[in-house]
Image (spheres, rainbow, N blue to C red):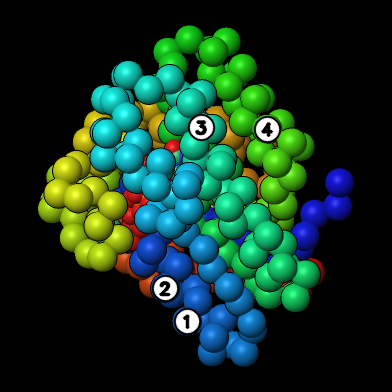
């Protein structure tokens, strides 16, 4: 299958600075006169799957251990199908397309809920086949994993998170963000995928002492990846 060459995905744990980096990279593309579009998955609050995703994350469909990870994966995958045509159109029109989360989020968060390696591997294979081969989602040219010190994730998730994008919670809490144990396991899934997928790159967001790097410094590395893609 040929890959669209201007599709980049930003991945990471909840509260890992994806929105911060998305703002910086879109400002850079804007200044450079490069036409781009971006999308954040899950797209909540619209469409049947968007509504289902919000219900799932605020716990209306059951607690973290009550919804089978394959069913949760199916909901997030359906949400992507609702926006598939739009992404394909952007790519056909020659835009650089940036997704804040994509298929690898589904693998990382849902496979992390299993302890057993065979169950993890089986679900990973299923998600990859279902989303790329059955639903025919475009494959990203490159995905970037923001590897942030876990202490900073803890801080970010224990602080009250605010903003319009929290409306889906309707005053409740997010079942993924509530579990730091899950977030730690999700990080392991991401690290494993970085090893397995040649187009998945780790962006180290800490210095040698383990301190969180400032946003601009992280941006410099991300920008270099984008510039490479645009030149290629
Ligand atoms: N490099 C950084 N150093 C310190 N704090 C950061 C950094 N990047 C983001 N933050 C802060 O961390 C929190 C989560 O960042 P955000 O970009 O909203 O993450 P996400 O989109 O992954 O949920 C915000 O309060 C943001 O200001
Ligand atoms: C896109 C996607 C997200 N998720 C998870 C990751 C997040 O915990 C949650 C929703 O993400 P969101 O709250 O938008 O992420 P962030 O806090 O990083 O801005 O859904 C999946 O499990 N599968 C998926 O396919």
Above or below residue 185? Residue 89 is: below
In front of the other: label 2 or label 4? 4
Residue at (86, 46) in percent of width and height? 1
Q: In the rendered image, which residue does mark 4 sit on?
A: 130
Q: In the rendered image, which residue does mark 3 sit on?
A: 73
Q: Which mark identifies residue 118?
A: none
CA gap, disc 1 to disc 3? 32 Å
Ligand 1 within 8 Å of disc 2? The answer is yes
Q: Are marks 3 and 2 in contact (CB under 8 Å)?
A: no
Mark 3, other Cα within 10 Å: few <14 / some 14–19 / many ≥20: many
Mark 4, other Cα within 10 Å: few <14 / some 14–19 / many ≥20: some
Q: Are marks 1 and 2 in contact (CB under 8 Å)?
A: yes
Ligand 1 within 8 Å of disc 1? The answer is no
Marks 3 and 2, the one that precedes in the sequence: 2
Farthest residue to the right: give it.
Answer: 1
Above or below residue 67? Residue 16 is: below
Q: Which mark identifies residue 27?
A: 1
Residue at (58, 52) in percent of width and height? 82
Q: Secondary structure at mark 1?
A: helix
In the image, 17 versus 96, the foreground residue is 96
Ligand 2 within 8 Å of disc 3? The answer is yes
Marks 4 and 3, the one that precedes in the sequence: 3
Residue at (32, 40) in percent of width and height? 55
Q: Is residue 21 left or right of residue 212?
A: right
């Amino acid at each position: 299958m040929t890959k669209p060459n201007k599709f980049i995905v930003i991945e990471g744990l909840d509260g890992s600075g994806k929105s911060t980096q998305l703002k910086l990279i879109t400002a850079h593309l804007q200044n450079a006169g490069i036409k781009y579009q971006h999308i954040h998955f899950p797209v909540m609050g619209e469409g049947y799957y968007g509504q289902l995703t919000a219900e799932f994350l605020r716990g209306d469909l059951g607690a973290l251990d009550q919804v089978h990870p394959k069913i949760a994966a199916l909901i997030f995958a359906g949400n992507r199908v609702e926006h598939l045509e739009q992404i394909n159109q952007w790519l056909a029109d020659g835009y650089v397309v940036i997704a804040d989360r994509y298929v690898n989020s589904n693998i990382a968060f849902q496979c992390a809920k299993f302890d057993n390696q065979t169950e993890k591997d089986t679900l990973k294979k299923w998600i990859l086949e279902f989303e790329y081969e059955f639903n025919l989602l475009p494959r990203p040219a490159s995905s970037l994993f923001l590897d942030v010190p876990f202490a900073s994730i803890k801080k970010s998730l224990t602080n009250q998170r605010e903003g319009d994008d929290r409306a889906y919670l309707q005053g409740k809490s997010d079942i993924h963000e509530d579990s730091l144990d899950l977030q730690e396991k999700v990080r392991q899934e991401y690290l494993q995928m970085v090893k397995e997928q040649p187009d998945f790159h780790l962006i180290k967001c800490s210095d040698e002492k383990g301190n969180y790097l400032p946003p601009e410094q992280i941006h410099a590395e991300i920008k270099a990846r984008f510039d490479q893609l645009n030149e290629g």
